[in-house]
Structure formats: structure tokens, C-alpha cells
Amino acid sequence: MAKKSNDNILGLSQILAGFPYLAGQINARIVKEHDGRDVLQIRNSPAGIHQYEVDGNPLGITVEKKHESYLDYLEHLIDKYTKEKGNVVGFRIDKSFCEILRLEGLRYYERYISFFLLEDFERSARDSDRNIRLFDIMSKYATEEYNSYFEQYRTYIISINTRARCLQQIRSGNEEQALEIAKQGLKNIEEFFPQSNVEDGKLTDTYYIVLANMKENLEKGLSYEDIVKNTGLEEALKERQSTLKLSELSEEELDRYKV
């Protein structure tokens, strides 16, 4: 039997009206909960809002009563297995647990992208660091299907993690440290290209190009305000290459860059 409507419970119309859906983009904001704590709200769907905790597990849960996430729990299991067996030989993550980790990783992804947009680069770097740990573990112990799924986003996550850490340092006036971070990030991506059989990655990988452009802007001595605006994908491509045209990029690549 359907329950009667409760006149004391409000709908979402007014909330949604004041927090518009932007097609192809993430609209994010930090708001206060009833107890005074900050929470992150994300509008990336015309139908509603996601709300995440700003620290700890995005859903505000714990796993097995003491671990922040299933990734932390998995790291505990690996450590336990290693102590019992003496090594990690034979340790594998089954398909169902891989899917749990994938969905959990998407929540952290939504959060670190939102923090980046809000210029909370410390939290963006923290959460993307966390997902890099996930990528590394999946590359060692996951099924081939899930390993491939994560590895296709490797250059993206390295790029945005590096950019977040760079911008955090630039804003603090540490330009030299920011430049070293950018150089290391580019090196990390370059090392990935031969592993993934990517040819001419420096010329064709969108995320490498964007990060390289940031490094060049640092070397030019641009201010935080100028760098954080970002020169944009089209300008970065023009600087880095003469043959690849914007029209040759897929819609998926363009949409991801809008971050």
C-alpha cells in the first residue's frame, strides 16, 4: 500500500532551481549540513543532486567498522595475506570485488573533480592520490577486464593529480616546487606510453598536452590567476602540435577536458 504524502516534507524543486544542471559539466558547491559540517553537493544530472562528505569516505561510511573504504580494506587483506604466505604470489581480486572497487572509485573521482573545480586543490590531490593507489593495485591483482578499464584513464588521473598539486604550490608562492612537480608528472605519463603501446603520446594524448602547457606557463612566469584560468585545449594543441586538429578529437576527450 502506498504511503500518504507528508505535507511537512519538502520536494527538491526549489533546491534544484537554485543549483542548475550544466549539460556536459559538473556543477559543485560546498554547503552546511544541519549539524554545521561542510558537505559537497554535485549537480551532474538533470534529475537530482549527489551529496558527499568532504573528508573520509564520500558516503560517510566505514568498511568492516574501521576502514575508510573498500580500497583500504583491500590493502589490509593484502597485508594480511603477505604476512601469512610470506609474499603476494597468488593473491587475486575476484570480479565482484573489482566492481565494488570500481564504483567506489567513481565516487572519489566525482569528488576530486569537484574539488578541482572549486579550487580546493589539496583535497583534489588527496582524492586523486587515493585513486592512483587503486589503479596501481588493480594493475597487479585485478582481472584483465578491470585492469584494462582503469589503465585507459591512467594519463588522465596523473595529469589532474599533478595539476592540482602544482596549483596548490603556485597559489602558495612555491613556483619552483610547482615546476618540479609538473616535470615529474610529465615523466610519469611518458613512462606509461610504451607500457600501453601508445605511439606519439606527447603529440596525441590530451592530458599530457594540457600538463605540458601548464609547465610551459610556469616557465614563462605566469601568475596563479593566469595559470588557473587555463589557456584551453585548442590553444594548448596549437602550441604542442601542428597536424592534429580539434575536430579529430572524440566527444569523450573533449568532455573530459571541460573539467
Image (cartoon, helix red, strand yellow):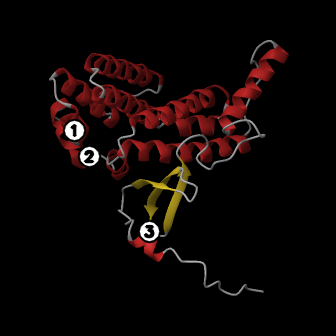
Residue at mark 2: 248
Task: Please tell me how crowded label 3 is: few (under 14), some (14-19), or many (20+) other residues with Cα within 10 Å.
Answer: few
Can the viewer see residue 200 in this picture? no
Question: Front-most of 148 and 43?
Answer: 43
Q: Which residue is mark 3?
A: 46
Q: Secondary structure at mark 3?
A: loop
At 38% across and 69% down in the image, what residue appears? 18
Dot 2 lies on which element?
A: helix
Can residue 130 be seen in this snapshot? yes
Q: Secondary structure at mark 1?
A: loop
Closest to the camera, between mark 3 and mark 1, is: 3
Whichever of labels 2 and 3 marks the residue nearer the N terminus, that label is 3
In the rendering, at what x and y percent does residue 112 appear?
46, 41
Disc 2/disc 3 C-alpha distance (Å): 29 Å
Q: Position of residue 176 (x, y in %)?
A: 27, 16
Could you tell me the amino acid type at mark 3?
A: Pro
Residue pictured at 42% horizontal, 19% vertical? 191
Contact check, label 2 and label 1, Cβ < 8 Å: yes
Q: CA distance from mark 3 to mark 1?
A: 34 Å
Q: Residue at x 48, y 56 (%)?
A: 41
- For marks 3 and 1, the one nearer the N-term is 3
The residue to which callout 1 is attached is 244
Residue type at mark 2: give it. Glu
